[in-house]
Image: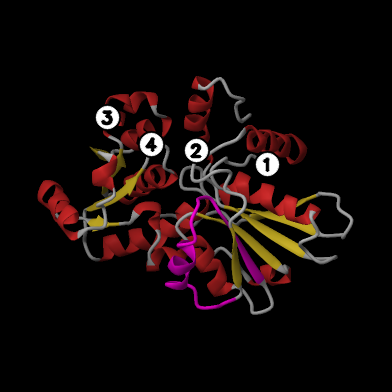
Amino acid sequence: MQTPKPSLIQQIPFKNKGNIELYIKREDLIHPFISGNKFRKLKYNIVEAQAVKYQTVLTFGGAYSNHIAATAYACKISGLKSIGVIRGEELRPKINENPTLSFAQSCGMEFLFVTRIDYRKKTESEFIENLKKQFGDFYMIPEGGTNTLAVKGCEEILNNDDARYDFICSCVGTGGTISGLINTSSAEQKILGFTALKGDFLNQDIRKFATNSNWDLLTDYHFGGYAKIKPELIAFINAFKTDYGILLDPIYTGKMMFGIIDLIKKGYFLSNTKILAIHTGGLQGISGINLRLKQQNKPLIKV
């Protein structure tokens, strides 16, 4: 995988009484197809797969998975075969109707569609052994891409210039990205994670990888749970695009930015605080989300 573009930092001119400065780090721009934290998570995993002479990478994901799309492209440009174990057998005949899966297939990814019940077994040894019987030996990357090598890649998101910020904010799915941010942050900084799904199990997952304790998870901005979307969130994302020229996704970054601005309004941050939000990408999934919203006669995300 080639070296990504340096991340651009943009100030969000959000007016507030406390003279709080809000910035966003555009990790979504570092690569056209493997953007944001997916590039970071895959970087050292692809290096490792090649180093130990694997020819195939296998991973897991859902209908509009950023990780599936990014893995397919990363394997394509790295000369590796890719296999995606996809949650939901009903998706098998609908590949061409699904922007994420059709893109991954165009990159050469082979799919195995499984029931939601079987998908829950994806970490069990018997399930994995059956996959090896079917596909042969492979380098396995977990759902969402989080493992030790993924955290190592995410540790490269922050650099020395970012030490000027008091708070670093990240959306949280599997905990890999925020763990990398925690590990490379300074003791004076606070890392805030905005969870995209319900549940407090993420604290335990992050502690497996995080080496510092200067972090906290905020669980009030998931809008009902993973991939749950409400009209209020869509309206916020569209207004943010209009006001600042930055597109957010509804699964992760939209919820995070909604939370940050809501906290600023509520006086969560002290006056003169400098906040850096990490834009982790995920924009490829908007096409699929808009298809679902259109079927439900709900407002669409303006791209």
Residue extent of the magenta highlight: 190-213
Task: Give the image location of residue 71, x and y in percent.
Answer: 36, 48
Query: Who's the residue at 31% across and 34% down the image?
Result: 105
| Mark sitting earlier along the chain (4/1) | 4
Task: Give me the disc on residue 63.
Answer: 4
Determine whether the residue tagged by mark 3 lies in a helix, strand or loop: helix
Q: Is residue 38 magenta?
A: no
Mark 1 closeness class: few <14, some 14–19, many ≥20 residues within 10 Å: some
Mark 2 closeness class: few <14, some 14–19, many ≥20 residues within 10 Å: many
Query: Who's the residue at 48% across and 56% down the image?
Result: 199
Q: Is residue 10 visible?
A: no
Q: Name the residue nearer the viewer: 54 or 292.
A: 292
Q: Provide the residue designation for mark 2.
A: 284
Task: Give the image location of residue 30, x and y in percent.
Answer: 55, 51
Q: Is residue 102 left or right of residue 232?
A: left
| Mark sitting earlier along the chain (3/2) | 3
Separation of marks 3 and 4 at Cα, in angstroms:
10 Å
Q: Name the residue nearer the viewer: 269 or 78.
A: 269
Query: Who's the residue at 20% across and 55% down the image?
Result: 138
Q: Is residue 120 left or right of residue 207?
A: left
Task: Give me the disc on residue 92.
Answer: 3
Task: Identify the coloring.
Answer: secondary structure
Q: Amino acid at mark 3?
A: Arg
Determine whether the residue tagged by mark 2 lies in a helix, strand or loop: helix
Separation of marks 4 and 1 at Cα, in angstroms:
25 Å
Q: Is residue 217 above or below residue 238?
A: below
Determine whether the residue tagged by mark 1 lies in a helix, strand or loop: loop
Q: Is residue 193 magenta?
A: yes
Separation of marks 3 and 1 at Cα, in angstroms:
34 Å
